[in-house]
Amino acid sequence: MVLALGAALAGPALAGGPVFCDRSQPLTAPEQARLLQFTGVVRAALAGTAAPVVLISRAGLDLSRFGIRYSHAALAWRDEQGAWQARQLYYACDEGRPRLYDQGLAGFVTGVDDPSQGYVSIVPLTGEAGEAVRTALLDAPRALRLLAARYSANAYAFGLDYQNCNQWVAELLATAWGGLPDGDDLRARAQRWLHAAGYAPAPVPVDSHGLMFAAGFVPLIHLRDHPEDDRYAMRLRVSLPASLEAFVRQRLPEAERTEFCHDGRQVVVRSGWTPIADGCSAAAGDRVLPIGG
């Protein structure tokens, strides 16, 4: 369901969940079946955690050209019926603005660009840290106050002109862990807290050709919000799921991570902070489950 500015949760969920403009492709029946099996594996893992909230990331758009696996992150919690819901920022194409959207686990996991393969990562936020995030996440006025008016896929992590989906998550974490009250300048205070707390998104190196390539399939790319030195160096500081996970690990050294991938034939599940190899290749200690049929 969409969390509209100035309103509580209202209105029907968008069919298929939030997607980039004109990127929605219908799934075939076999593709849908495999993705639902993949979702089932992720759901079973979540059933075993007592954490009040989890940081969940997926590989949506293919950004491997830039050395990026995960493009989209959300914060998920159990609703009153015990089902996991992922709250996230998405770009409402018809309105031309970002919105907050609550989506069930299946919709989140299956919101990929290429259904023949997929990656999902979960990091449970336990204890008081997790409770603080859950409280802030479900505080609609504060969650909405953090929503910028303009979206940029490569928004500068410490700028107020634009915002991407992962930057909203970063600022929500800051609001929770910094105990920041609501107010018109909440985003600015959240970014100051992040900077002071050592949040440091790794610069994304892009050359002019790479940026032009990305602009062909990623909507709303901007450069003017980035510092001049970063633009000249073509190394942009953008909030990405990897930056969020690194920050969580820095703040919560006991945090655990589970990564899941599928290649249409099998699901690989890995516990730990070492990424699964490209191609969804299993290593010693990984769980491998067949899917398909």
Image: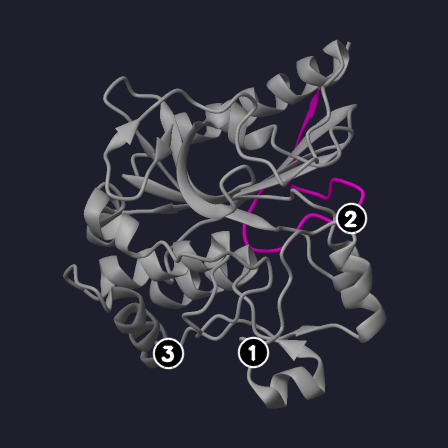
The three-letter code of the residue at mark 2 reads Asp
Where is the N terminus found, in terms of image quarters? top left
Give the x, y percent position of residue 54.
38, 42
171 vs 8, left or right, is right
Q: Nearer the viewer, mark 3 or mark 1?
A: 1
State the CA–CA distance, disc 3 to disc 1: 16 Å
Crowding near the residue tagged with mark 3, few <14, some 14–19, many ≥20 C-alpha atoms within 10 Å: some
Q: Nearer the viewer, mark 1 or mark 2?
A: 1
Relative to 35, residue 228 above or below: below
Q: Quadrant of residue 65?
A: bottom right
Dot label at residue 195: 3
State the CA–CA distance, disc 3 to disc 2: 32 Å
Crowding near the residue tagged with mark 2, few <14, some 14–19, many ≥20 C-alpha atoms within 10 Å: few
State the CA–CA distance, disc 1 to disc 2: 31 Å
Q: Residue at x 62, y 24 (%)?
A: 38
The three-letter code of the residue at mark 3 reads His
The three-letter code of the residue at mark 1 reads His
- Upstream in the sequence, badge 3 or badge 2? 3
- Report the span colored magenta: 270-290
Q: Outermost residue, front direction? A: 95
Relative to 244, residue 71 above or below: above
Q: Outermost residue, bottom direction? A: 229
Give the x, y percent position of residue 84.
38, 27
